[in-house]
Image (cartoon, rainbow, N blue to C red):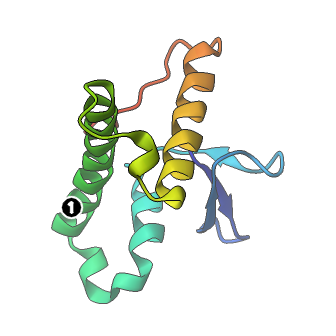
Amino acid sequence: MPYAIRNVHGEIIGLTASPNSENDEPVDFTDPDVLQFMAKDAGDISSQPQYHELLIQDLQQIRILEDLIDLLTAKGIILFSELPSPAQEKLLRKKTRREELSQSNDILVDDDPIL
């Protein structure tokens, strides 16, 4: 779950994987403020609901791709070491974070955003 860094006006100015200060708040990727922050460079299109829907779908598809990579490596179709080093690092970092969250006492941890 990402953590939002907000300015004095309450607008998200950054997202981090872990809190950097006590003011950083946990947010969901489907939160409208998060979507607005992620889409701010997209210009006028970012205000369209369809664009927000596409962002949510993109985030869900990322998880599908991670699961697909796990399946292909488990079946021996590809070797994890065949992936580029930056991809390996990102996948391992995310897998480690998911494992940490699943082992925490938070029984409400859910990988998939609720629509």
| Residue plotted at (47% across, 55% down) | 87
Residue 3 percent location from the top left of the image? 63, 49
Looking at the picture, which amino acid does disc 1 mark? Leu
| Residue plotted at (63% across, 66% down) | 14
Residue 15 visible in the displayed image: yes
Task: For label 1, count other residues whose C-alpha is less than 10 Å away and answer few (under 14), some (14-19) or many (20+).
Answer: few
Is 107 on the left or on the right of 73, as rendered?
right
Is 1 on the left or on the right of 4, as rendered?
left
**Which residue ends up furthest to the left in the rendered image?**
50
**Image quadrant in which you'd find residue 27:** top right
Is 38 on the left or on the right of 59, as rendered?
right
**Which residue ends up furthest to the bottom in the rendered image?**
43
Q: Is residue 26 above or below residue 16?
A: above
Residue 107 percent location from the top left of the image? 53, 12
Residue 47 percent location from the top left of the image? 28, 76
Residue for badge 1? 54
| Residue plotted at (39% across, 62% down) | 35
| Residue plotted at (47% across, 44% down) | 28
**Image quadrant in which you'd find residue 42:** bottom left
Quadrant of the drawing holding the C terminus: top left
Residue 1 visible in the displayed image: no
- The secondary structure type at the circle numbered 1 is helix
Quadrant of the drawing holding the N terminus: top right
Q: Is residue 115 above or below residue 29?
A: above
**Image quadrant in which you'd find residue 67:** top left
In the image shown, does 71 or 43 lie closer to the viewer? 71
In the image shown, does 111 or 74 lie closer to the viewer? 74
